[in-house]
Amino acid sequence: MSAVATKALLELDDLSVDYVLADRRVRAVDGVSLSIAPGEILGLAGESGCGKSTLASAVLQILKPPAEIAGGRILFQGRDLAAMSRDELRRVRWRHVSLVFQSAMNVLNPVMRVGDQFVDMFKAHDRVRKSDALARAGDLLELVGIERTRVRSYPHELSGGMRQRVVIAMALALEPELIVMDEPTTALDVVVQREILQELEQLKQRLGFAVLFITHDLSLLVEFSDRIAIMYAGEVVESAASDVLFRSALHPYTNGLMSSFPPLTGPIVPLTGIAGAPPDLAKPPPGCRFHPRCPKCTGLDSALHRLQTSERPQLREVAPGHHVACHLVDGA
Amino acid sequence: MSTLEVQGLGKRFPLRGTGIRRDMLDAVSDVSFTLRPGCVTALVGESGSGKSTVARLLARLYEPSDGTILFDGEDVGGQWRRKTLLDYRSRVQMIFQDPFASLNPVKRVEHHIARPLQIHGRCTRGQVDARVRELLARVGLVPPDEIAQKYPHQLSGGQRQRVAIARALAVEPSVILADEPISMLDVSIRIGILNLILQLKRELGIAFLYITHDIASARYVADEVLVMYRGRIVEQGPTDAVLLDPQHAYTKLLLSAVPNPESGLRLEPLVRAELADQTGTQLQEFRPGHYVRRPA
């Protein structure tokens, strides 16, 4: 385990994030442990409200009140981001860890030319001449498949897909080791999404950065990432290599997600999805948080049912690299 | 049950300038199809392809620039009196994409479903409560007594979309236009809404127009698929004929872009050629019932 820990680029160790309200604390991320190796794409999948975006904000230390880290560590190259001063963080952010938001269309300043926004970003981190920064901006735009003359464009003159590419180019600008991408392609249509993912994959091969890729689209993740972690109601319920997860997922929630995507080829079989809705994190169900929706939690075996509804399952390694938190899965 | 048929439908929006100098945007042109009872017709395409404009034309929120809309063979274009519109809308209902925006946040569920019953005079005052509960049960919102008293913010996205469907059903429509009804919902509850559409088509014989950019979901629910590109239908026909043996370059492009866990990430570039200009093309029958847009 220690060999893995030293190799990891980013390691989340029992991370918890609370939203502190007037009269109570709502735990949005609950004891999450994950690690990303250099050059790896880790997919984080989950539905709205499962805490995946809160987790992304925690990694970059940009949680806004009422959210705050309630426990655990965020180790980036062995240093705890949660314990860093503002000044230290400023040196890590963007140069080492950058972020691509979901609504990249709205991240760009509408009244500034694209090139000037690159210049601002370079000047915030380095002492550079404006002409050098603009030239570098042109290089970066070419890298993501946009003509370099577009440095003179305003954001509204670009399509949604181009704006998303611009934001990705900015995230790459200082050659960070890790890019956190929170639903980077959700607002785009499938053709543009595919083109951007292909570009990302090629850039990754060339530049060697790691990606924490957050989305609700599991079919996309299986295709695109090396490893996948599934989040439900604030916790990781299963993690494994993408192909392992696709072929032999063990957690009933993961299986439910997998059977929520109708196939494009082959026979059409009636799908069921998952009954019910994700729980309110202010009052999560006792025991396994998925049990009210779980098709395998039948109550036929009363001892098992008592366990499922009273004790929270722990994430255990059931096969090398395959972790599951479920009472129904036998340990390795 | 009735059929809704459109022939040569077109919509132009003014961009800038005036009079004959005015630039016009061809949002939709030369669109023809028929919505039949007990049939789901999917309209797929990328954002900006004109899908929602077609829905709005059919819902009579826009006046068409060209073409005709026939309801049971009767031309309903140009009839804009309140009485005729009310009558039309009691037969053609719409479900919107965002169930967070389409319900009034300060009114209970009950109110949303009782309103169309009252406006269209579908039942007497004494029957309203019973009918509201019957509709809630029909869309799978149980127990209906409890749900009827809730406010929209107390429901999940999937439940809200079911309320929107119950509201559409209240007036016993023949046709429902569903504009991206699942794209804002959580993945695990999307299938539930699609199954409800299938159930309603089977049990009530409603004709659905299902608008989506998610081709896999179109394959799951639809009997017939229309593929739209830049305001025109480029391919249409029975679902599996179009999606398993696509003929038009754009249909092929769309299908090749859908994530496929089986194959892993394909890095070969997508083919955008052959897609340049659609002018001078027309739909031609490739196989019985399967049409492809080709140069005339």
Image (tube, coloured by chain):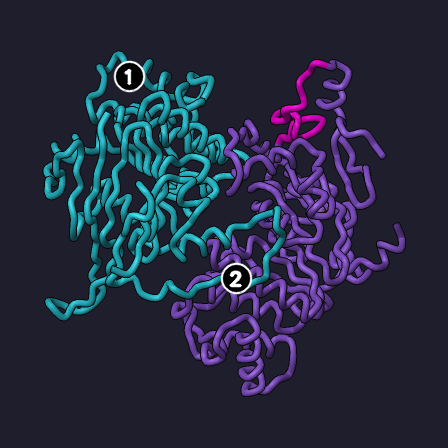
The residue lying furthest to the top in this view is: B126
Q: Residue at x 53, y 64 (%)?
A: B269
**Residue A294 located within the stretch drawn in magenta:** yes
Which residue type does callout 2 highlight?
Glu
The residue wearing badge 2 is A195
Query: Label 1 amino acid?
Result: Val
Image location of residue B258, percent across then percent down: 51, 50
Local secondary structure at mark 1: helix
Q: Have a look at marks 1 and 2 and say if they share a chain.
A: no
Provide the letter of the chain coloured cyan. B
Q: Position of residue B231 (x, y in %)?
A: 29, 55
Q: Is residue B202 above or below residue B58?
A: above
Residue at (18%, 41%) from the top-left corner? B69
A288 vs B272, left or right, is right
The single residue placed furthest to the front in the displayed view is B287
Residue drawn at x 10%, y 40% as measured from the top left: B79
Q: Which residue is mark 1?
A: B128
Q: Quadrant of residue A210?
A: bottom right
The answer, for residue B104, to whether it is visible in the render is no
Badge 2 crowding class, 10 Å Cα cut-off, few under 14, some 14 to 19, many 20 or more, is some
The residue carrying pointer 1 sits among few (fewer than 14), some (14 to 19) or many (20 or more) residues within 10 Å by Cα, namely some
CA separation, marks 1 and 2? 52 Å
Q: Is residue B91 left or right of residue A218?
A: left
Please identify which colour was used for chain A in the image: purple
Give the image location of residue A321, x and y in percent: 80, 45
Q: Split into 4 quadrants, where in the image is the C terminus of chain A? A: top right
Does dot 2 land on a helix, a strand or a loop? helix
Report the magenta residues as a range. A283-300
**Magenta residues: mostly which secondary structure?**
loop
